[in-house]
Amino acid sequence: MALNQKHAPTGFESNKDPIYDSEKNSKYGSGDMESRGRHSSSFGQRGGRIGPVLKHLRGTTELAGSDSDANILAGQIEAESENAIQYRTCSWQKTAALLFSEYICLAIMSFPYSYSVLGLVPGLILTVVIAAFVLYTSLVVWEFCLRHPEVRDVCDIGQMLFWGKTWAWYATAVMFILNNTFIQGLHVLVFAKYLNTITNHSQCTIVFAVVAAIICWLSSLPRTFSALANLATASAFFTFISVLLAAIFAGIEAHPAGYNPDPSFIDPVTGIHGGEPTVTALPVAGTTFVAGMSAFLNISYTFIGQITIPSFIAEMREPKDFPKALWAVTIAEVLVFGIIGSVVYAYTGNQYNTAPAFGSLGNETFKKVSFSFMIPTLIFLGVLYASVSARFIFFRIFEGTKHKSSHTVVGWAAWAGILAATWVGAFLIAEVIPFFSDLLSVMSSLFDSFFGFIFWGLAYVRMRRVDGGVTWLSDMSIYGYSMLALNLFIIAIGVFFLSAGTYASVQSIINSYAAGTVGGVFTCASNGL
């Protein structure tokens, strides 16, 4: 399926502006005016400058003329004004709620484990560094989407970045659907884990997984992100309560789960040493590359979520306000991840850590209460990714028809059917693959390398090339060269994830098989904490 080849300026910046006039070969990074405008817009303030769009003609990149192209964004909003179902209705506050629900999630409770492997100091440093890189690349995504308000999801961007090639769209689409479905499968699995924990394994785990998939499917039926925003707010709020309670309970209980006062004791099953919880500032001697890399990737994957940003921006009434939502969630992420991870690690130490950290709580009531507040996010985060996937398919089937914008039987049946297919796929993936969590790491290494880093470093280079014309490299300022170096480094990080991350994830699968910890297929065995 080819991308619509007609592109137009956003209306936020005319291509006839002297700064971006292609005939004058103006370039980004060469003047204070461009820098001030771009920095202002990065915080969601008015007056930011957005450059011209990319226009693909026979594989080349040219400037699109503002005189001949319509303002797509204004046209989209106007075209929806009479529709029963309107998509471009999200405020930046609602978009912030969606971002909070995506990032303030169960993965927070794996940070104590990561800190126990990496050491507290490197763990906290990496938390801040990864957050900064994801913030920056997310702003690049946003700038790209402002130039292209016709973009509906990351698949459109993937095709644009690779000169409008159809194969790029299909390759991105495959990664996009698989990534989202695996995340849905993770939430089916974890929801079943919760039900096993809270009921002391009263039913076969497969039954709990089916119940989880059905609940998630029903919750994902709302058609617009604006309608999902209220659920997103509740999800983020209850997740915050959940992790806060876990940290408080870890601090007030006498000992973590599995505690043994004898320092010379070694658990014959787990190999865990006894004694008081040990907290280290640096990695302990003997930490392997695979263990350290897995802990680092765990932190990184929690932050990487740029794959949903184009879909969110596509339903914002004012896309230029997106940075407000992005900065709010990034600041909250760093504080919550760092504080909760550090506090829980301080009380559970290297010996008694589990992932998620609810399992580290020795008091059963504490564990069940704190885990129970996580229910909304166990449901909603999978719902969010299912909705993003369903949009990708639904919009391309019904674009330009009444079924997309009206309450028709065909439209709602197709929407429900597409969602059901994604949840059936998620259930099967979660149950059929016995090393699901390790495979999820492999998929994350393969896909997040592109969606978290490579795409956006490349997007920056492509945009600067359009801004500066054929002489953009020779005309750049020192600032321009430093930003180019930064984005080339971001691409290199993506390549590192793709290579070293995939190796570490595959080796972890091999180690799990060697240790005999790989479970069965469609098993009734409890996976509770």
Image: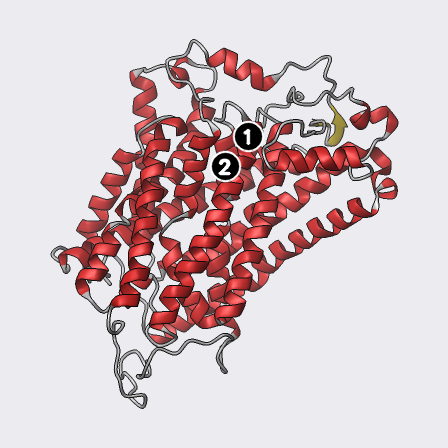
Residue holding disc 2? 325
Viewed as shown, does residue 479 lie left or right of 167?
Answer: right
Viewed as shown, does residue 494 lie left or right of 383?
Answer: right
- Residue that appears at 64% across and 14% down: 70
Q: Amino acid at mark 2?
A: Ala
The residue sitting at the top extreme is 82
Q: Amino acid at mark 1?
A: Asp
Could you say which quadrant of the image residue 254 lies in?
bottom left
The percent coordinates of residue 79 (x first, y second) are 50, 12
Examine the rendered structure and indicate whether residue 8 appears above or below residue 174. Answer: above
- Residue that appears at 30% across and 45% down: 238
**CA separation in Å, label 2 and label 1:** 7 Å
- Residue that appears at 17% across and 61% down: 365
Q: Is residue 317 visible?
A: yes
Examine the rendered structure and indicate whether residue 383 appears above or below residue 91. Answer: below
Examine the rendered structure and indicate whether residue 472 appears above or below residue 194. Answer: above
Q: How is the image coloured?
A: secondary structure
Q: Residues within 10 Å of mark 1 (few under 14, many from 20)?
A: many
Callout 1: SS:
helix
Residue holding disc 1? 321
The residue sitting at the bottom extreme is 264
Viewed as shown, does residue 176 lie left or right of 424?
Answer: right
> Which part of the image, by quadrant, shows the N terminus?
top right
